[in-house]
Image: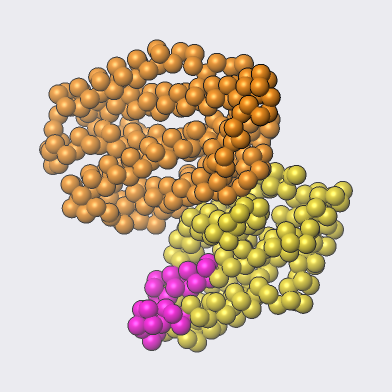
Chain colours: A orange, B yellow
Amino acid sequence: MTIYGKGLRGLSLATIATLGVALTLIFFYAPLDANQGFVQKIFYVHVPLAIISLCGFIFGGALAVGYLRTGDKRWDMRSYVAIHLALIFGIGGLITGSIWAKASWGHWWVWNEPTLVSFMIVLLLFATYQPLRFSIDDPERQSRYASVFAIVAGAFVPLNFIAVRLAQEYVHPRVLTLSGGNLPGPMRLTFLVSFLGLLLLYVTLWKYEMAAKNARMQVRALRRRLLGDDGIRPVGRSAAPS
Amino acid sequence: MKTTLTVLRKDLRLELRTLETVPAMTLFAVTTFVIFHFGLNRATIDGQLAASVLTTTLLLAGMLGVNRLFVAEREQGGFDAFLLAPVDRTAMLVAKAAALFTFLTVLEVIAVPAFGLLLLGPSLGRSLPGLIAVLALADLGIAVIGTLVSAIAIHTRARDLIGPVIGLPLLIPALIATARAIGPLLAVHGSSSPPGKWLAVLALYDVVFALIAYAVFDFLLED
């Protein structure tokens, strides 16, 4: 039996500490942006959320490969948790992005903005992940098909960004380029701490959910052994692997 | 290879005898042109707008074919028969993609002239070779992704809904590239060769998804 709760306490504390430091840095250390003023501070939350969400989608696809290779349904569960947390982070990124766009460009939504548009397409695609799972009854087939979907969609993420980026002119501030970006020192430090904090949050939540799901599975297995098949309630139709 | 040809021949013969899918796709496309005429309230269109109308219509008509692709297999036990036969499962992917590609080609042979007749301002003649090249690449992408999506959707309860809902976002990059590549061809004094950048994007898209489909398709047939 694998215990997924191992190290959770330390991880949770580290997450809280890092997020606390990040918030302190955001509000008291990072300088105000010359053009956008205070509202620019949402950047320290929005950009990490979006990046982590996209990485989470790809991470989910990579975990799904594990399921197809081994047929072990714990891989499918890992992939499921990764994708559904990434969806939540992604919606957070979309909302914060929208607020930022309204404040700095005057519109809730801008179409000539490749990062925003491709992000929405990716989100639209992954929003079908749960309906797809939900509409397949057989759990084994559900895992298999969801894994295939996760792999295809994970590969879709970078391709989609290439296509949309080529289609439009740049409006987005290019803060993260391969040459190191054009953020001044204090801002970059704040951004990196904030990114680390949110990344830790993602990992912690992922581990928590895995621990919960795993514990439930073990409880069911124990009940079945002690009380027989009548002792457990049947699993309802669900999008989540159980 | 022999298996692929056999399955493909079966699909084409089935379509020729029942005439279920392709006529419906064509009819849908022509109806959509009429809807666009009234929706846009324009007698003729050209340039990027024309390219978008054409691409969108073909994509949506293509989705009809995607939805129907595996219906016969599911209803009449073709999957079981195929799995029982000692043949490579990839043959099914290739055959189905080829069948869908053929359907799309027939659709375009009718729908593109109809578009030229009904909506397009500039004449089609000059840009035809470029248009054929772009549409062939686009069809390849729709055929590969459509087959994959159709195979995923066919075993779900809400299969008619799941297909388009997964397929359309996956095809958005192909749609962007196709519409941008066709745009200059349909302009009033446009060029006669499509922009290479978008052809490259389409080709890249086709290759990547063909490889992915090849890698994962077997898992969709397993039972």
Magenta span contains residue A66: no
* B145 to the left or right of B53: right
Q: Nearer the viewer, residue B11 or B199?
A: B11
- Quarter of the picture containing the N terminus of chain B is bottom right
Q: Tell me the residue at 69%/24% (across/down).
A: A228
For the record, the magenta segment spans B33-60
Q: Tell me the residue at 27%/54% (across/down).
A: A109
* A215 to the left or right of A56: right
Q: Nearer the viewer, residue A214 or A107?
A: A214
The percent coordinates of residue B60 (x first, y second) are: 52, 68
Asked whether the viewer can see residue A182, the reply is no
Res. A17 image quadrant? top left
Outermost residue toward the right in this view: B86
Res. A45 image quadrant? top left
* B59 to the left or right of A137: left
- Quarter of the picture containing the C terminus of chain B is top right
Please say if B155 is above or below B185: above
The percent coordinates of residue B51 (x first, y second) are: 44, 72
The dominant secondary structure in magenta is: helix
The percent coordinates of residue B151 (x first, y second) are: 66, 54
The percent coordinates of residue B65 (x first, y second) are: 62, 67
Asked whether the viewer can see residue B22, the reply is yes
Q: Nearer the viewer, residue B13 or B182?
A: B13
Magenta span contains residue B54: yes
Q: Tell me the residue at 48%/37% (across/down).
A: A83
Please say if B47 is above or below A229: below
Please say if B162 is above or below A235: below
Q: Tell me the residue at 76%/67% (across/down).
A: B11
